[in-house]
């Protein structure tokens, strides 16, 4: 589940065209559902993207249950503001399997009907559009809250229903997302690789440094390591040494240190006043550089807030890749929280999954997984925190 609050879209074709920009990769064999929020500050005919969700395509026999599973988070996130649901199936043509296209067309049509049935009694979450994307073409089967005439012939999606996707260069919101660093040419496997990369040479060096720290614990300066981690992640003050990497990873093993960074980097979502930090740690926390005010509220496209957040996530993942795996769950969870806070649901899910593979009982990762599964947006979370 991802959330976005800044991109403005005009029409279903443009919505279909920006899916890879929203997700930061082009999906395969997937269903992508987008909620477009009719905020009062939007112009007539425009809607701000509220949230998006990518899931694997289901089997035909599970469509009704699947529709509830996918759409329930959307209905919970509406928060009294109309949320137009757009759904797009990525089901690329394979000429070697041409005989299967009729069955795939039928599955898409049945999924559309399941969505329409699920949202039939949800006036605040209308089912606005449903399209099938294959290659660089889209067939819109449902638009404006009703089936599209001529988009279904009873057994197939007819050839006349397929039209070219608008080029990203012609969609203003796509340009905004490119400025944020989104890469529509990536695949989901690239996101997985970003999270799961390992540098075993650096990890072995960090492991040796950690063993030396165990032998001489008086050498470890917790506050200095907290300061260095905060400044390296946000300000990039040079590459840390093996020992510094090891001690930064060691510092964040403390739950209060992890929460200090969350409070500093995501103050609207994890306010520092919710914790009783020791005086020295609280003082260090006040010195840590911030990432900017956009997180948790939707960073301005192309702003320094958004760029800093992307760099911070990558540095946390880089640090995790170069220390022993047992030390990575806090780093992965911090990266996941930052990703969730800026609307990167795919990366957040991957980082949480890896953290829980390594430590199934890591509580902060378990909490964030619940948040992601439930479809709780940063916007909703921030409102509850502020209440």
Image: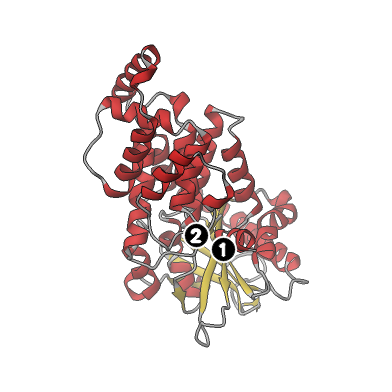
| Residue that numbered label 1 is attached to | 379
Q: Is residue 352 visible?
A: yes
Label 1 environment density (alpha carbons within 10 Å; few <14, some 14–19, many ≥20): many
Q: Nearer the viewer, residue 45 or 373?
A: 373
Residue 41's place in the image compared with 324, above or below, is below
Question: Does dot 2 land on a helix, a strand or a loop?
Answer: loop
Q: Quadrant of the N terminus?
A: bottom right
Q: Residue furthest right?
A: 121
Q: Nearest the camera: 109 or 220? A: 220
> Residue drawn 47% across and 44% down?
260
* Residue 20 percent coordinates (x, y): 42, 59
Colour mapping: secondary structure
Of 180 and 264, the residue lying toward us = 264
Helix, strand or loop status at disc 1: helix
Q: For the point 48% across and 35% down, which residue is it?
A: 330
Q: Are marks 1 and 2 in contact (CB under 8 Å)?
A: yes
Q: Is residue 38 above or below residue 2?
A: below
First along the sequence among labels 1 and 2:
2
The correct choice, above or below, for 335 with respect to 377 in the image is above
Left or right of 290, for residue 120 = right
Q: Which residue is mark 2?
A: 296
Quarter in which the C terminus is drawn: bottom right
Q: Quarter-wise, where is residue 283 in the image?
A: top left
- Disc 2 crowd rating (10 Å Cα; few below 14, some 14-19, many 20+) is many
Q: CA distance from mark 1 to mark 2?
A: 6 Å
Q: Quadrant of residue 320?
A: top left
Whether residue 296 sits left or right of residue 242 in the image: it is right
Q: Position of residue 232 (x, y in %)?
A: 30, 42
């Amino acid at each position: 589940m991802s959330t976005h609050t800044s991109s403005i879209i005009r029409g279903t074709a443009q919505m279909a065209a920006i899916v890879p920009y929203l997700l930061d990769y082009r999906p395969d064999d997937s269903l992508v559902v987008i909620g477009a929020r009719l905020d009062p500050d939007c112009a007539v005919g425009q809607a701000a993207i509220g949230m998006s969700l990518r899931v694997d395509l289901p089997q035909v026999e599970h469509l009704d249950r699947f529709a509830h599973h996918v759409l329930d988070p959307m209905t919970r996130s509406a928060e009294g503001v109309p949320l137009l649901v757009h759904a797009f199936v990525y089901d690329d043509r394979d000429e070697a399997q041409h005989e299967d296209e009729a069955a795939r067309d039928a599955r898409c049509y049945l999924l559309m009907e399941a969505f329409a049935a699920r949202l039939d009694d949800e006036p605040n979450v209308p089912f606005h559009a449903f399209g099938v994307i294959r290659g660089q073409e889209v067939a819109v089967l449902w638009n404006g809250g009703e089936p599209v005439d001529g988009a279904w012939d009873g057994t197939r999606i007819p050839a006349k229903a397929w039209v070219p996707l608008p080029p990203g260069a012609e969609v203003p919101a796509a340009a905004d997302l490119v400025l944020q660093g989104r890469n529509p040419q990536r695949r989901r496997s690239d996101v997985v690789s970003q999270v799961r990369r390992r540098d075993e040479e650096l990890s072995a060096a960090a492991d040796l440094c950690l063993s030396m720290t165990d032998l001489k614990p008086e050498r470890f300066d917790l506050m200095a390591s907290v300061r260095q981690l905060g400044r390296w992640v946000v300000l990039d003050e040079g590459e840390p040494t093996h020992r510094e990497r090891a001690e930064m990873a060691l510092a964040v093993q403390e739950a209060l240190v992890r929460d200090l960074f969350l409070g500093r980097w995501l103050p609207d979502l994890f306010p520092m006043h919710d914790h009783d930090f020791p005086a020295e740690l609280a003082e260090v926390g006040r010195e840590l550089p911030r990432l900017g005010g956009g997180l948790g509220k939707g960073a301005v496209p192309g702003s320094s807030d958004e760029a800093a957040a992307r760099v911070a996530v990558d540095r946390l993942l880089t640090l995790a890749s170069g220390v022993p795996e047992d030390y990575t769950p806090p780093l992965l969870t911090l990266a996941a929280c930052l990703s969730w806070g800026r609307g990167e649901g795919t990366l957040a899910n991957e980082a949480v999954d890896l953290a829980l593979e390594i430590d199934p009982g890591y509580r902060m990762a378990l909490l964030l997984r619940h948040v992601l599964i439930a479809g709780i947006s940063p916007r909703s979370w921030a409102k509850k925190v502020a209440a």
